[in-house]
Image (cartoon, rainbow, N blue to C red):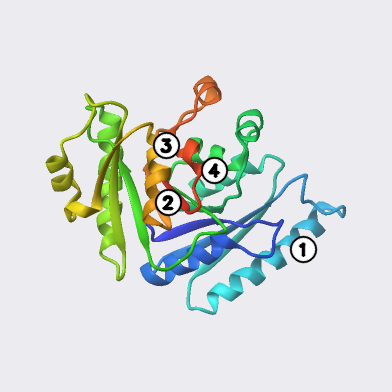
Amino acid sequence: MEIDRLFVVFDPTTEQQLALERAAVIAANEGSKIHLFACIHDDTAPKDDREAGLAEQEAIVDQAAEAVRAKGIDVTTEVVWEKDWYNAVISAAKQADVGAVLKSSVPHSKSQRRLKRTSDWTLIRECHCPVLLVKSSATLEPRKVLAALDISGDKEAYGELNSNILQFSKRYVGTDGAEIHFLNGHKDLISRPDRGTLIRVCGVDADHVHIKMGEPDEVIVETAEELAVNLVVIGNSARSGLAALMDSNTAERVLDKLECDLLALT
């Protein structure tokens, strides 16, 4: 996960910009630049003409950016007018060639997620880069991470996801005060991974490697609560169309159950 440039989705419905706050912390530690993006759509657009509405939103976004720039962080801004703001975010992030997208996330019920397209799920399914969904209850310190792996299967997609998770985790462990745990959930005894192999793959102390039997989303949430982590890292097998409508991936299933931030790596 390259984090030299972060794409932050500005939330025009609230004063507290959780994603921007989190991006500022990451940028200060990593020397990253921030691209702050806002989209005016039907629910938030002012009644005045489009030009006046854009100017008003640009002033608000720039004010938020100035507070971060005051910390010595390079921040660029972009404000657009687009009804389909979900896809506007995805297109803008791709065009800006960023390493990760950050967005604040609020809980939704299962019916809300399944019956209505949400921005969180759209980003998880369709964004070209890692997505960090920031929760209001998440704390910044201490930095404690749970990374979910699956080394039991031989699917090429899982292997690539595992590799991306491990690369990110090793980079994260190199930061001061970070503590990282690895979890491999398995549904039955046949798919249980070898503990010694998992420890060698992860490269951490044995007490930071956890193997649990059960549904992946359930054991991830359970372990995250037990360890009181403030970030869960998970591989994202993005899907769209009918497959997305009929089923959801693990990242989507754990999102509303977690009290901490969720990073979905592709």
Q: Which residue is mark 2?
A: 225
3 and 1 marks in contact (CB < 8 Å): no
- Between the residue at mark 3 and the residue at mark 4, the CA separation in whole angstroms equals 11 Å
The image quadrant of residue 141 is bottom left
Residue kind at label 4, given as amino acid type: Asp
Percent across and percent down for residue 166 are: 26, 48
Q: Nearer the viewer, mark 1 or mark 4?
A: 4
- Between the residue at mark 2 and the residue at mark 4, the CA separation in whole angstroms equals 13 Å
Q: Is residue 205 left or right of residue 13?
A: left
Percent across and percent down for residue 33 are: 45, 65
Q: Which residue is mark 1?
A: 56
Q: Earlier in the sequence, mark 2 or mark 3?
A: 3
Q: Which residue is mark 3?
A: 217
Do we see residue 265 in this rendering?
no
Say the numbered circle drawn on residue 256: 4
Could you classify mark 3 by the number of other residues whose Cα lies within 10 Å: few (under 14), some (14-19), or many (20 or more)?
some
Could you classify mark 1 by the number of other residues whose Cα lies within 10 Å: few (under 14), some (14-19), or many (20 or more)?
few
- Between the residue at mark 1 and the residue at mark 4, the CA separation in whole angstroms equals 33 Å
Quarter occupied by the C terminus: top left
Image point (49%, 70%), residue name = 74
What secondary structure is marked by label 1? helix
Q: Is residue 266 left or right of residue 166?
A: right
What secondary structure is marked by label 3? helix
Q: Nearer the viewer, mark 1 or mark 2?
A: 2
Closest to the observer, 73 or 172: 172
Residue kind at label 1, given as amino acid type: Glu
Residue kind at label 3, given as amino acid type: Asp
Q: Earlier in the sequence, mark 3 or mark 4?
A: 3
Q: Earlier in the sequence, mark 3 or mark 1?
A: 1
Q: Earlier in the sequence, mark 2 or mark 4?
A: 2
Say the numbered circle drawn on residue 19: none
Q: Nearer the viewer, mark 3 or mark 1?
A: 3
